[in-house]
Image: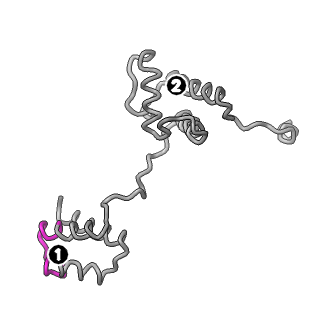
Amino acid sequence: MSKRALQRKIHVACGQLGYDQETRHDIQLAVTKKASMSDMTETDLKAVISRLEADGWTGSSTKGKRHKPAPRADLRYVHVLWTLLGDAEKLKSPGRDGLNAFVRSRFENKWQSVPFDIDSLRDAGQINDVTRALKDWCMREGIQTEMQKTPAKRRLLK
C-alpha cells in the first residue's frame, strides 16, 4: 500500500474514532516520534494504524457498503419480493446471499447456466421465472405483493 493510501487510512480512522488533529498528532508522536505524516516511512504509518486499531478502529464501516440498485426494474422487483418474504420471516437467509442461493437451487437444472449474482441476469424469461416463483411463494404465505385498489381509488381511476 502506498504512503498516501496509508495516510488516508489514518485520517479516516481518526475521523471514525472522533479524534481531532491535535489528538492524531499526539498519537503519531507517541508511536513514531514524528509529528508529521510526510516525515514517516511506510513502517511508521503502519505502526500508527496498528495503534488506532488497538484504540478500537476496525478498518471497516457499514457506511457506503450497500449494493447498487439492480440495473433493471424487473430485477429490483425480485429484490422487493425477497424483502417481503424476509420481513414476514419466511426465509432462512433473508439477505442477498440467500436470494442468490434460492435462484441457484431452484433453477440450476432448468437453465443452461445460473449466474453467480441475481443482478447479472439479463434474460427476461429467466427474470420472469424468478419473479413468478417468488410471487407464488408470497401468495402461499399470504403476503400481499400488489397494491390493492380501494373503492375510492377505483372511482378516481374511471
Q: Coloured how?
A: one colour
Q: Quick one: label 1 or label 2, which is nearer the N terminus?
A: 1
Residue for point 11% across, 70% down: 41
Label 1 secondary element: helix
Label 2 secondary element: helix
**Residue 49: x, y in percent?**
22, 67
**Three-letter amino acid code of the residue under disc 1:** Ser
Compute the Cα span from label 1 to label 2: 54 Å
Q: In this image, 29 relative to 140: left or right?
A: left
| Residue closer to the observer: 16 or 121 | 16
Q: Residues within 10 Å of mark 2 (few under 14, many from 20)?
A: few
Q: In this image, 28 relative to 116: left or right?
A: left
Residue for point 54% across, 22% down: 129
Magenta-drawn stretch contains 38: yes
Magenta-drawn stretch contains 15: no
**Residue 131: x, y in percent?**
57, 28
- Looking at the rendering, the stretch of residues picked out in magenta corresponds to 31-46
**Quadrant position of residue 118:** top left
Q: Tell me the residue that label 2 is attached to.
A: 124
Q: Residues within 10 Å of mark 1 (few under 14, many from 20)?
A: few
10 over 119 or under it: above or below: below
Q: Give the quarter of the figure containing the C terminus.
A: top right
Residue for point 35% across, 71% down: 17
62 over 107 or under it: above or below: below
Q: Tell me the residue that label 1 is attached to.
A: 38
- Please name the predominant secondary structure of the magenta segment in the image: helix
**Residue 87: x, y in percent?**
59, 42
**Three-letter amino acid code of the residue under disc 2:** Ala
| Residue closer to the observer: 15 or 138 | 138
Q: Which mark is residue 98?
A: none
